[in-house]
């Protein structure tokens, strides 16, 4: 599903180059549930951005579903993101003046799906994440957990190959974190590949594999006994 070999990434700080990722090798199979951990500055967010085709590598190779991700135009990069990836963010990234239903349906608008069809599908996914009763509410009328459920429904609606979740519980309390991770486990059990970036060991324990970055290299990569939430 995802194959990265000898990946390097640096940023020009003006006076020098900051080498953020240093020869990353990572393979993630279809259906895996992986957490990427590391302290601030470890390179985990940079790695997620490259996986999400939001940033480019300097050297190395990256293949997503057998397709080489390299030298893409903005249009092609957007096409691949729409086709392969669903995103969930810590800050939810919902549009404040649109209802929950409209936020979930939005990716289908950009795929030229008609209004009736996209609203029907949006309701299906709101029901899937347990928030259909809040379909007509605006984001400021929702709790943090409800907002994240809307964001997860939006990520799922295009049936992407991979869900990328960047600190998806970072803005949530412990009880709501439990509910969101339980939902992600259920989605993973249905066969969806999920990659979570987190700095929280408790969240990582609810995935099936922990990849830990330190100073731009993979310090450890281990399959774990997942703490299944019920």
Image (spheres, rainbow, N blue to C red):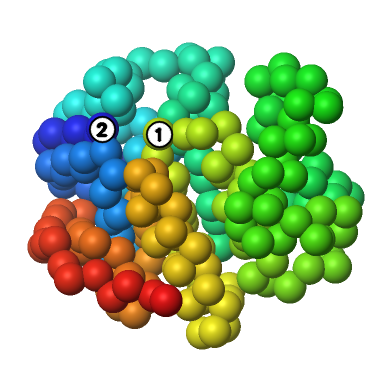
Pick whichever, 43 or 142, lies toward us. 142
Kindly identify which residue carries mark 1: 161
Q: How many marks?
A: 2
Residue picked out by circle 2: 1
- What is the quadrant of the C terminus in the image? bottom left
Q: Position of residue 1 (x, y in %)?
A: 26, 32
| Residue under the image location 29 percent in, 18 percent down | 67
Q: Residues within 10 Å of mark 1 (few under 14, many from 20)?
A: many
Check if mark 2's residue and mark 1's residue have beta carbons within 8 Å: yes
Please identify the quarter of the rendering in which residue 215 is found.
bottom left
x, y percent for residue 105: 73, 37
Q: From what the image shows, is residue 113 above or below residue 143? A: above
At label 2, counting other C-alpha atoms closer than 10 Å, the crowd grade (few under 14, some 14-19, many 20 or more) is some
- Where residue 139 appears, x then y in whole percent? 80, 60
- Left or right? Give the position of 218 relative to 177: left
In this view of the protein, can residue 141 be seen by the observer? yes
Which callout, 2 or 1, points at the residue further toward the start of the chain?
2
């Amino acid at each position: 599903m995802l194959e990265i070999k000898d990946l390097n990434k640096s940023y020009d700080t003006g006076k020098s180059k900051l080498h953020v990722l240093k020869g990353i090798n990572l393979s993630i199979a279809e259906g895996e549930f992986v957490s990427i951990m590391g302290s601030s500055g470890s390179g985990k967010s940079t790695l997620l951005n490259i996986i999400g085709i939001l940033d480019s590598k300097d050297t190395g190779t990256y293949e997503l579903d057998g397709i080489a991700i390299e030298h893409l135009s903005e249009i092609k990069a957007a096409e691949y993101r729409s086709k392969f990836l669903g995103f969930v963010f810590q800050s939810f990234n919902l549009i404040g003046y649109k209802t929950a239903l409209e936020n979930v349906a939005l990716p289908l608008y950009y795929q030229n799906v008609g209004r009736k069809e996209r609203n029907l599908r949006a309701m299906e996914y709101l029901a899937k994440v347990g928030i259909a009763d809040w379909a007509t509410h605006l984001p400021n009328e929702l709790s943090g957990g409800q907002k994240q459920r809307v964001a997860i429904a939006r990520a799922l609606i295009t049936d992407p190959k991979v869900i990328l979740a960047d600190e998806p519980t970072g803005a949530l309390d412990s009880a709501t974190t439990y509910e969101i991770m339980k939902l992600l486990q259920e989605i993973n059990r249905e066969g969806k590949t999920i990659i979570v970036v987190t700095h929280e060991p408790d969240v990582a324990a609810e995935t099936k594999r922990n990849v830990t970055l330190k100073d731009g290299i993979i310090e450890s990569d281990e399959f774990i006994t997942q703490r299944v939430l019920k």
